[in-house]
Amino acid sequence: MTRRLFVLVATMCTLNSSVGRSQEVDVSSPKLRIGWEEFKKLYDAKKVVVVDVRDKGAFEAGHIPDSRSVPLDEVERRAAELKKLKKPIVTYCA
């Protein structure tokens, strides 16, 4: 079984351009996902920002080292903050 992670680089750009519009992002698109092996290489090389989209309690109970906590309901509001990091963003929820 291959683990899948969301990559939100394109999504973040789309969120910024579609705020206030009825346009919706298809986050199930294979273009926005990477496999575990690819993630591990990028993570080990510090080429991605890892964002945990679970609630604060779940994050505090345990998370990927060096990940940032941005609960799912805050992602859109904090998209500009994350874009300033100038790295691809990988989100996870479990």
Image (spheres, rainbow, N blue to C red):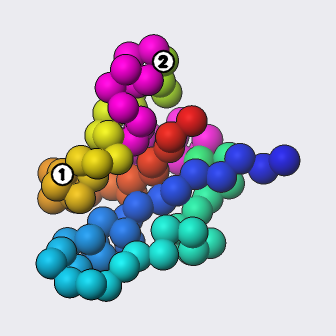
Which one is in front, 22 or 46?
A: 22
Determine crowd level at label 1: few under 14, some 14-19, many 20+ residues with C-alpha closer than 10 A: few
Q: Is residue 88 left or right of residue 77?
A: right
Q: Position of residue 30 (x, y in %)?
A: 62, 72
As displayed, is residue 38 above or below residue 12? above
Q: Residue at x 37, y 69 (%)?
A: 11
Question: For the residue labelled by badge 2, is the local secondary structure a helix, a strand or a loop?
Answer: loop
Residue 37 visible in image = no
On the question of residue 24 being in view, the answer is yes
Residue 42, magenta (yes or no)? yes
Residue 51 within the segment the image draws in magenta:
yes
Indicate which disc residue 78 carries: 1
| In this picture, residue 87 sits left or right of residue 61 | left
- State how many labels appear: 2
Instruction: Give the mark nearer the N terminus: 1 vs 2.
Output: 2
Q: Check the picture and name the quadrant holding the C terminus.
A: top right
Kindly give the residue lying farthest to the front in the view shown: 22
Q: Amino acid at mark 2?
A: Gly
Q: Which residues are magenta?
A: 40-61
Residue 32 x %, y %: 52, 68
- What's the distance in space between the residues labelled 1 and 2, CA to CA? 22 Å
Check disc 2: other Cα within 10 Å, few if <14, some if 14-19, many if 20+: few
Residue at image mark 2 = 62
* Mark linked to residue 66: none
Q: Residue at x 36, y 79 (%)?
A: 24
Name the amino acid, label 1: Arg
Quadrant housing residue 41: top right
Task: Give the residue at the far right of this rendering.
Answer: 1
Establish if 88 lies above or below 60: below
Q: Give the image location of residue 43, x and y in percent.
A: 51, 40
Q: Residue furthest top?
A: 61
